[in-house]
Amino acid sequence: MSIQNLIDDEKCFQTVREMRWPKRVRCVHCDSTLINKRGRHNTQKYRQRYKCQECGTNFDDLTGTVFEGHHQPLKTWIVCLYFMGLNLSNRQIAAELNLNKDDAQAMATQLREGIVAKKSQLS
């Protein structure tokens, strides 16, 4: 059994929302809290879409994050991040996630860069 089978898509998106917006959803463009929910993503049923009432920007749970714009499901990214925390090599991560080693390398690199960028924003 793969660890990915133990991870719930809905919980992954809920966790991203809670970490990203601990109090309430904010516009990724103007930081307004006047937000309307706009249904769910077409191919990822737990990915919530939003529209800002102030600036009119459309965005979703992953807009502007390291997880945005990739073909791998969110739970694959979350499990990859977990394996990185366990100090697994990219080759081991690729084997565990049944990925090409180049894809695992690219994912790990993007996750590291995203974490570094976030830390520099907080400094």
Image: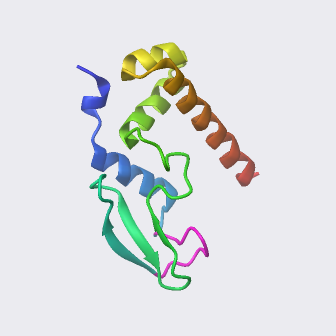
Name the quadrant of the N terminus: top left
Question: Is residue 81 rendered to the left or right of residue 114?
Answer: left
Residue 67 placement, left or right of 79: right
Is residue 105 among what the camera can see? Answer: yes
For the question of whether residue 88 can be seen, the reply is no
Give the x, y percent position of residue 40.
30, 63
Q: Position of residue 44 (x, y in %)?
A: 31, 52
Overall secondary structure of the magenta stretch?
loop
**Residue numbers of the magenta segment:** 25-34
Total numbered circles: 0
- Is 27 colored magenta in this rendering? yes
Q: Nearer the viewer, residue 40 or 42?
A: 42
Q: Tell me the residue at 71%/53% (across/down).
A: 122
Q: From the viewer's perspective, is residue 114 above or below residue 43?
A: above
Above or below for 71 versus 93: below
Q: Looking at this view, is 75 or 43 the one in front?
A: 43
Residue at 60 percent of width and 71 percent of height: 29
Query: Which color scheme does this rendered protein use?
Result: rainbow
Indicate the position of residue 114 as horizontal and vertical percent values.
62, 43
Position of 86 relative to 27 (above/below) = above
Residue farthest to the bottom, as pictured = 54
